[in-house]
Amino acid sequence: MNKVKNFISRLAAAVIAAAAVFAVASGCTKEEKTGSITDISNISLPGTFRGYYGDAVTVSGSGFIDGDSIVLQSTEDSSVEYVAAVTAVTGNSLTFSLPDGISSGEYRVYVYRAEARRLLGRINIYITSGITVPDKAGCNVKGFVGYNGTPIPGVAVSDGISVTTTDEDGFWWLASDKRNGYVFISVPSNYEVDVVRTIPQFFAYLQEEENVTEQCDFNLYPADNSRHRVIVFTDVHLVDRVTDRSQFQRGFMREITSYLAECRSERIPTYCIALGDLSWDTYWKSNNYNLANYLDDIQGLDCAVFSAPGNHDNDPSISGDDFRAAGQFRQIIGPTDYSFNIGDIHYVMLDNVIYTNPQGESGTSHSYETGITDEKLAWLKADLALVDKSTPVVLGMHVPLYKSPASDGSSSYNFSGAEDLVAALSGYDVHIITGHTHYNYSITQDEGIREHNIAAVCATWWWTGHTNFAGNHICRDGSDGGYKIFDMNGTDISWRYKGIGRDDDYQFRTYDRNSILISKASQCPDASDTDFSTYVRGYDTASDDNYVLINVFDWADDWKIKVVEEGGSELPVTRIRDYDPLHVLSYNMLKLAKDQQMTFPTSLTSHLFRVQAASATSTLTITVTDEDGNDYVQTMTRPKALSYNME
């Protein structure tokens, strides 16, 4: 333990030095100068550097001269800068020392010369412990996990295949084939890690060949997060088309930023989980927009975002190699399969997309299969072996475990090998969170497992809110585009679906079937009769049967619904599987009117209910009660017209 004590002494000295450096950085460094340094060329800056204060960082390039100085500026807060001492200049490089007190994070690296400065590039810096972990025979990766030099025992560490834990000194060792290119920790309960551009730094990229032993350290910070919230979102599909980025910023980003501020004022730690299809492989090349650009668009979120890959997050130029196709995700976002703990909940993220893409970049399908490979399943079992059965598990994947349910709530597995996954989860209280479908449904079929399939942030791929479209934001099942908020208090878990721009208690929409009559002449006169009759989904027929449709977006089998007609009569409620009329109007009809490809037509949903009133004009009081006994009430005045922006 002498090494740990020495580190603490060094850290104390570094903190004193850091105060001086920060004071210089905040107001006394060289002011920004005009001009440029044009005689430096062939610049190559390490993208990532792991080390301790005083360690040497070398920038390759010709044209550096004695007297050049280096300043590191935080990309998160440009007012935070650190002056780095230049220790060597050669004909093809410049070397500087990692400044005392600098925090882990991403920095812009500037060279200053006289009255000019030049940006050399960006570097991700990870401060290691300063402790040398002894080698262990047969192990080629090792490290230290602690809080400012104080070891934290029992922390799970993995390379995505093998799993080990830290000993009483905070030391760990692994024999790794280094195939994944990283190691990660399962962040323990009541600790957090640094966050760089929304990415939590629970993992470290490996730099050496398999035959070279390397050390990766993780510094944790205490956090009282037994009570916490998680914002789960999926299917963002940002690719700089159909005003997606502007819709995303003024809708989702503005709303989540405000909500995070509210959570901070309540002193409730809040995190995000993204369940894949962050971008869209089809457009990576043609629109010059990929996962790195997605990170630029979400960096305004002031919280950690834990992500799983979707089928559209794979490299479209790669054919027949699922592992290589996920390489962009691993390098830009991070691990594809991992776990972490927040408070009393164990979280697991799994990649259940097997990218095949036989035609490569020239193809159009970018096809894939769904499943959990044997390797991933073995890792999951090893991970869960360290988790007590009394600990609730939240498992995030992109593609759902179960298919959309029938009108009686029954379902079946959605991919081959699902039984093995369910068996691995046996004995745990499990909430599975998934996306992919762009609609909502909840399944409680296997004992101990509840799946929340969550509708998309992009709704119908940003179409209905696009310029000259419906002006709403609606998914294929009629749910508003949105996300789900989970509130965790110890082992108690509650949740609600939140439509973007909607109040918290807006959980369903009602339709007066008597007032729905979609005509070809008024909506899409130039469409073919065949296309119109196919995509109008039966809403071109008038009705005078006094039926009312109720679309309960996040319906689950333990919810209840009660409808009372004016005068006090309670009406029988029937669950049906049908099409949402507002989506038919907002997408199908407008696509036909504009003679555009019908890529994402209205889908069948079984969270739709029907009642028959005695009168065509009576007022109905509809009460939907969720699993926690919360009532959501709407008073429906009839007749009620179908329109783009109806409540």
Image (tube, rainbow, N blue to C red):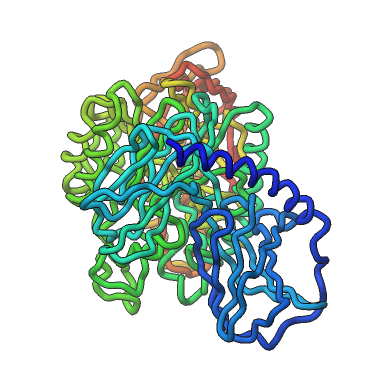
Between residue 529 and residue 603, name the one nearer to us.
603
Point out the residue furthest to the front here: 2
Q: Residue at x 35, y 65 (%)?
A: 208
Between residue 472 and residue 279, name the one nearer to us.
279
Work out whether 107 lies above or below 631.
below
Point out the residue furthest to the top here: 568
Residue 314: percent from left, percent from top: 36, 64
Question: Which quadrant would the N terminus be assigned to in this image?
Answer: top left
Residue 542: percent from left, percent from top: 46, 43
Q: Is residue 103 visible?
A: yes
Rendering quarter of residue 571: top left
Q: Residue at x 51, y 69 (%)?
A: 46
Between residue 201 and residue 347, name the one nearer to us.
201
Left or right placement of residue 444 versus residue 293 in this view = left
Q: Residue at x 50, y 63 (%)?
A: 48
Work out whether 26 lies above or below 192.
below
Q: Residue at x 27, y 61 (%)?
A: 179
Question: Which quadrant would the C terminus be assigned to in this image?
Answer: top right
Residue 244: percent from left, percent from top: 57, 60
